[in-house]
Image: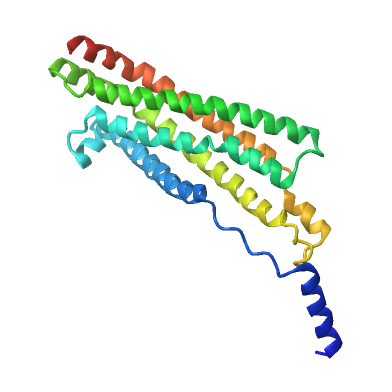
Amino acid sequence: MSADNENNINNDNNEHGPPPDLPAVPPITLLLYGTTILSALALIFSIASTISCTFTKRNFSARVVGNVHANDLDLFLGIWTWRGLALTNDADTCFRYDELIGSGNDDNDDVMMTVARMVSVLAGLCSGSSMCLAVLFHVSSAHQNDNVALCHRQCRRCTYNDVLTLSVLFFLASVLEGLKLLMIYQADICSDDRFEGAGGSVATYDSCRASSGAYICVLSAALSFLAGSMILLWACRFRFPCFKMASIAN
């Protein structure tokens, strides 16, 4: 390499600065990995339970875990609700996405972002409400008599299809959330002021912005809302009668 070329490279480095460092992986991404694994395990557990109950007329979870109490289902309810609350970061991440890659030049993207934020708020309300109900059910069932325990067993038998539905919904929501976070992570790189100095071209920057991320935000938020609504309906339909009986018995 000639001395002139080396001098040109040194001058470019001095003018643009060193190449940008890759941003650190956000903590929410680590949370996503963990909750996605929980969702996948819950999905497998629910499918196995449903198949076992269908073909053997016996309780799969009872054979594996023992005498499963309705509080065990409440534990899953709490896990899935926390998953829903994690997904409500849609509101924050969509705001951040908007700031990073700027959808101001596309009115349609602006509308989609607004819809995503509104749906995210509704999803948060559903998830928060179901979390409160789960805590309420735990408190009410702390001291039970035989009649209340019978009610819990009846509730346990009629919830497997709902548990399976919730598992699938949250698993799909996890996938969409992962796609969205990857786009935001990529936008962190693309939005760096020194992107062009690091060797990127304007065309590469434009393609890196991935304006379709607005639609991913809406889909992810919509699935969060759907899953949260299902949890809320599940709790009210199958658990609230038990809560009323427990209140009367206590």
From the viewer's perspective, is 45 left or right of 4?
A: left
Q: Residue furthest right?
A: 4
Which percent across, then down, holds residue 101? 73, 46
Image quadrant for the N terminus? bottom right
Q: Residue at x 48, y 29 (%)?
A: 227
Choose between 207 and 53: the one closer to the eye.
207
| Residue at image point 33% right, 19% down | 238
Answer with left or right where residue 5 lies relative to residue 45.
Answer: right
Farthest residue to the front: give it.
Answer: 14
In the image, is residue 100 above or below residue 129?
A: below
In this picture, residue 193 sits left or right of residue 35: right
Q: Which residue is at the front of the view, 139 or 119?
A: 139
Residue drawn 31% across the image and 36% down it: 49
Q: Name the foreground residue: 76 vs 8.
A: 8
Q: How is the image coloured?
A: rainbow
Where residue 201 appears, as percent x and y from the top left, is 81, 62
Please state the horizontal and vertical placement of residue 74, each as a whole percent of the image. Answer: 31, 30
